[in-house]
Amino acid sequence: MTSPFEEVELNKKHEEILGKRAVLLQQMESRYEQQKSKRRQQVKLSQAAHERNAQLLQDLQKMENRLRTRKLPHPDILSLETRYWASVEEKIPEWEHFLLGKGPHPSSDPSRTPKQRKQKTTPRDHAPTQDGALPPRPILKHVK
């Protein structure tokens, strides 16, 4: 048999255990509620991301359709574009070191003559008029 003193000790331990159990149950419920709220928030974020992605896909499809149905530019413009990009590609080796920050500007190259640095101009282009002013520039007409 147990003495009354041991019984009191056992009751105290039992009360402590029940108190700890109640605290742990409360903590578990709190964490469960936190997890539930996190899941709800993640679901909302996921749905929002899904809607954004769907909208982006629709926008991309609209843009693709517009590009497919767009009229091609005039052949002269295509020819000019092609020649422009060909000239750009031709000049890349000259400009590469300068653009990468590893060398001087191509026009400051002392081995090039001034004629090579400037575009060819005709004397008529820069001939002053009788009053000393330059003639007006010609008006360029745009082809549509």
Image: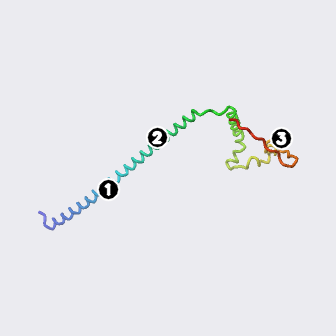
SS for callout 1: helix
Front disc: 1 or 3: 3
Return the disc, 1 or 3, that comes first in the chain's sequence. 1
User: Going by the picture, which residue comes out furthest to the left?
Assistant: 1
Residue in the foreground of this view, choosing between 71 and 21: 71
In whole angstroms, how far apart are the C-alphas of marks 1 and 2? 36 Å
Relative side of 127 to 65, left or right:
right
Pinpoint residue 30: horizontal percent, then vertical percent: 32, 56
Q: Which mark is residue 30?
A: 1
User: Going by the picture, which residue comes out furthest to the top?
Assistant: 75
Return the disc, 2 or 3, that comes first in the chain's sequence. 2
- Tell me if mark 2 has few (under 14), some (14-19) or many (20+) residues whose alpha carbon lies within 10 angstroms of its own: few
SS for callout 3: loop
Residues at circles 1 and 3 in contact by the CB criterion of under 8 Å: no
Name the residue at 74% across, 46% down: 106
Please count the marks in the image: 3
Above or below 139: residue 9? below
Residue in the foreground of this view, choosing between 17 and 39: 39
Q: Amino acid at mark 2?
A: Ala
Name the residue at 50% across, 41% down: 56
Q: Amino acid at mark 1?
A: Ser
Pinpoint residue 132: horizontal percent, then vertical percent: 86, 49
Relative side of 80 to 31, left or right:
right
Pinpoint residue 99: horizontal percent, then vertical percent: 68, 47
Q: Amino acid at mark 3?
A: Thr
Q: Which mark is residue 54?
A: 2
Return the disc, 1 or 2, that comes first in the chain's sequence. 1
Which residue is the site of mark 3?
122
